[in-house]
Amino acid sequence: MLSKEKPSYSGTTLILSVLDEENLWVANVGDSRGVLCNENGATIPLSYDHKPSQLKEKKRIEEAGGFVSMNGVWRVQGILATSRALGDFPLKDKKLINCEPDILSFSLLEHKPRFMILASDGLWDTHSNEEALKSISRHCNTLGGIKVGLKHLCNDAISKGSFDNITILVHKF
């Protein structure tokens, strides 16, 4: 059956984490994002979005023969709102985007995490890191806990006008 399907040229972003007893590693490609809430309620970014508006990313795109333009948000070739992705082969074939991840490591002993959120840009387009952490934090110790917090956060993103897909994962330490 797969041979009869039309090829897909779409793409996706990636955010993933790996844990052991002492360390957390986070890899990201694109504009999915990770944030950590520590025991004191402080916000610790676990990743950085790959956006065509960033000078380093814009320079790389232009050196490959592409351009960055404003079309609602900054976009590669007027099309893609992220400068790194998995897939998106028409732009990747021209070396305008790539799938090289940023990989960051964090000491769990030093950062004393309470929980972390890994989510797609459908959340981050409508919520700051702090807003998302506060929303989950309010529900951590309530009946239904994080599950209720996730549902509330997702519905809030939709009510604030998120038109993108929304994937949210919360890991409680």
Image: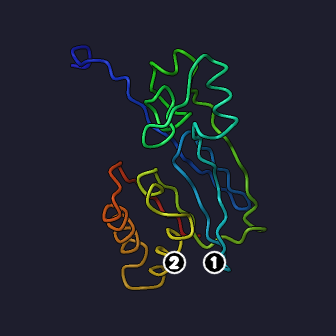
The kind of residue on which mark 2 rests is: Ser
Task: Check disc 2 and report its element: helix, strand or loop.
Answer: helix
The residue singled out by tag 1 in the image is 41
Q: In the shown orientation, is residue 171 left or right of residue 150?
A: right
Choose between 161 and 4: the one closer to the eye. Answer: 161
Disc 1 + disc 2, Cβ < 8 Å: yes
Q: Is residue 79 left or right of residue 113?
A: left
Q: Percent x, y for residue 33?
A: 55, 52
- The image's mark for residue 1 is none
Residue at 70% of width from left, 35% of height from top?
Answer: 56
Does dot 1 land on a helix, a strand or a loop?
loop
Give the vertical position of 34 relative to 40 (above or below): above
Residue drawn where x is 47% and y is 81% of the image: 138
Label 1 or label 2, whichever comes before in sequence order = 1
Residues 25 and 56: in front is 56
Q: Quadrant of the N terminus?
A: top left
Mark 1–mark 2 distance (CA, rounded to whole Å):
8 Å
38 left or right of 96 in image: right
Compared with 146, 96 (above or below) is above
User: Where's the C terminus, which quadrant?
Assistant: bottom right
Percent position of residue 29, x then y: 57, 39
Is the residue marked by circle 1 packed among few (<14), some (14-19), or many (20+) residues within 10 Å?
Answer: some
> Depth check: 93 or 173 in front?
93
Above or below, comparing residue 149 to residue 10 in the picture: below
Picture coordinates of residue 137, whole percent (x, y):
51, 77
Please provide percent x and percent y for residue 163. 32, 51
The outermost residue toward the bottom is 142
How many C-alpha atoms fall within 10 Å of the one at disc 2: few (<14), some, or many (≥20)? Answer: some
> Looking at the picture, which amino acid does disc 1 mark?
Gly
Residue at 45%, 26% in the rendered image: 88
**Label placed on residue 137:** 2
